[in-house]
Amino acid sequence: MSSQCYTTNYLKEPWRGYGPGPPRVFGLIKSGMAWDEAAGHIYRGGSFGNGAAMRIAPVGLFFWNDHARLREVAYLSSRITHSHVLGMEGAALQAMAIALAVAENPAMPLSSQSFLSRLINFATEDVYRTKIAQVSTLLGQPEDRQEVVNRLGHGIEAFNSVPTATFAFLAHPQDFVSTVIYAVSLGGDTDTIASMAGAIAGAYLGIDGLPSQWLGQLENRDYISNLADRLWQTAPGQR
């Protein structure tokens, strides 16, 4: 999605709950500032929030079998609003988690350790490698939500939420509803973390794993379903 498309969509529905940064970025772009300069103009060094990771799911699905291209496009998509390396890396890792999930067969046991090992190998920033390793440790312990929050975080920063979303999925890989509800139960930036966890779970389980009651209440369901079909039809090497 181009910066102009982001800006146009925001101006159509500015009440959608955007954080404070993106609308300012869109305003600068609309006024003529280059898209790759606007975010850095507002946040010195760029934002490392989790907004780019929250919206990255289509990139992970489209480039599920081309991880180099996935990283490249994830970074480009993120730079419009989140140009700090930790913001872009968080989006790339979220996209990678989705790519790994969609390549798995949900009818077969999921190896959490293999999943996490591939994420660690993909990561380029130490803060993410450390937290993904913590995910592995936490999965081997009795459930303790406070310990999860203490070790992984639940904030708006990408490094304090992307690993948390991965944990929520791996703690409940066979149950979409449990994944989302667990993510919300951790508190903090609940909507974003649940969105990211749900995106990984949805990629893994597929449409049949989504609750029909939730689908029935989805706003613009037909429009979103059509976009999903078009994404699958055009993705290279679709599963």
Image (tube, rainbow, N blue to C red):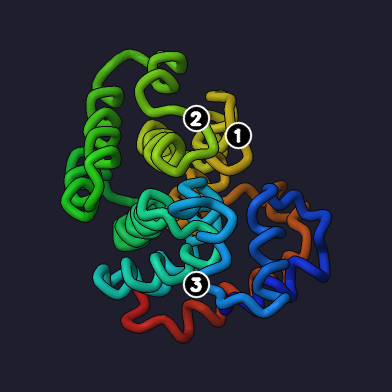
Q: Is residue 177 left or right of residue 14?
A: left
Q: Which mark is residue 154?
A: 2
* 200 displayed left or right of 207: left
Q: In 3D space, how far apart are the residues under numbered discs 2 and 3 (Cα atoms)?
A: 28 Å
Q: Quadrant of residue 180?
A: top right
Q: Is residue 220 left or right of residue 80?
A: right
Q: Are marks 1 and 3 in contact (CB under 8 Å)?
A: no
Q: Are marks 2 and 3 in contact (CB under 8 Å)?
A: no
Residue lying at 71% horizontally and 47% vertically, measured from the top left: 213
Tag 1 or tag 2, which sits nearer the N-term?
Answer: 2
Q: What percent of the width, then of the height, locates residue 2? A: 57, 79
Report the residue at 34% width, 61% height from top: 99
Marks 1/3: CA distance?
29 Å
Expressed as whole percent of the image width and height from the top left, the position of residue 141 reads 28, 16
Q: Secondary structure at mark 2?
A: loop
Quickly name the residue at label 1.
190
- Looking at the rendered structure, the secondary structure element under dot 3 is helix
* 2 or 3: tag closer to the N-terminus: 3
